[in-house]
Image (cartoon, rainbow, N blue to C red):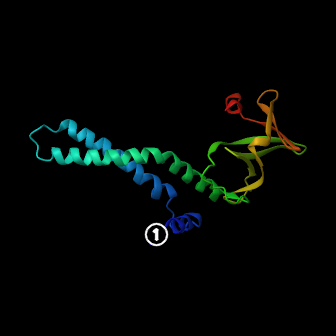
């Protein structure tokens, strides 16, 4: 049997080379697409076609199924996204949690005594994770994380701003004003 644990193992170690979305999202989206196709087919069917009642019955059943899918597809997309980010982060375990949602991710420049350093930030509903990208590795190395409830921000000049978290502060710069305001 191919259960969720085996699916994640296959995905995490890239044994099967197929993204998780292939297993979870594409079938759901395909069912939504089939409903649209059946609706289009019925528009072209006249009343004297024998298959029309079968197609209408299939459409009713598929519509009921798709109502349930629409309720859960956002959660499933978030789950896949969290799994993909977890795979790309080294040093932060247990990222995939039911109540956690990704709000934004992006690259910012951190101001330090050694100059500007590129950092990747992942903002979730409950935690901010910051990481660097080692030159020869495929994953991000997590440098730290802070709970969102302890964050304060202060605007700076141009495209910069400062984040305060407990006893730590970072002065960061975005590439453009638009990126900063996101």
Whether residue 146 sits left or right of residue 124 in the image: it is: right
Q: Based on the displayed image, in which of its 4 quarters is residue 154 positioned? A: top right
Residue 103 pos. (x, y %):
64, 41
Quadrant of the image for the N terminus?
bottom left
Whether residue 117 sits left or right of residue 9 in the image: it is: right
Up/down of 74 relative to 11, above or below: above
Residue 3 pos. (x, y %):
48, 67
Residue 123 pos. (x, y %):
69, 44
**Residue wearing tag 1:** 2
Residue in the foreground of this view, choosing between 136 and 88: 88
Whether residue 5 sits left or right of residue 36 in the image: it is: right
Q: Based on the displayed image, in which of its 4 quarters is residue 14 positioned? A: bottom right
Point 35% across, 45% down: residue:
33
Residue in the foreground of this view, choosing between 31 and 66: 66
Point 22% across, 44% down: residue:
56
Q: Residue furthest left?
A: 48
Disc count in the image? Answer: 1
Q: Residue furthest bottom?
A: 1
Q: Residue furthest right?
A: 113
**Mark 1 Cα-neighbour bin, 10 Å: few <14, some 14–19, many ≥20:** few
Quadrant of the image for the C terminus?
top right
Q: Based on the displayed image, in which of its 4 quarters is residue 48 positioned? A: top left
Residue 159 pos. (x, y %):
76, 30
SS label for mark 1: loop
């Amino acid at each position: 049997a191919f259960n969720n644990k085996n699916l994640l193992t296959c995905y995490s170690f890239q044994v099967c080379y197929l993204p998780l979305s292939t297993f979870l999202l594409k079938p759901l989206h395909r069912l939504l697409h089939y409903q649209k196709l059946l609706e289009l087919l019925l528009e072209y069917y006249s009343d004297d076609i024998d298959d029309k009642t079968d197609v209408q019955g299939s459409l009713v059943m598929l519509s009921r199924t798709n109502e349930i899918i629409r309720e859960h597809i956002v959660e499933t997309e978030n789950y896949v996204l969290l799994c993909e980010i977890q795979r790309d982060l080294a040093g932060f375990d247990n990222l995939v949690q039911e109540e956690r949602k990704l709000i934004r991710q992006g690259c910012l420049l951190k101001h330090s005594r050694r100059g500007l350093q590129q950092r990747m930030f992942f903002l979730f509903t409950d935690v901010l994770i910051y990481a660097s990208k080692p030159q020869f590795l495929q994953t991000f190395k997590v440098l730290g994380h802070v709970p969102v409830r302890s964050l304060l921000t202060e605007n700076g000049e141009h495209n910069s701003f400062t984040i305060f978290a407990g006893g730590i502060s970072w002065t960061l710069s975005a590439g453009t004003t638009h990126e900063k305001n996101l």
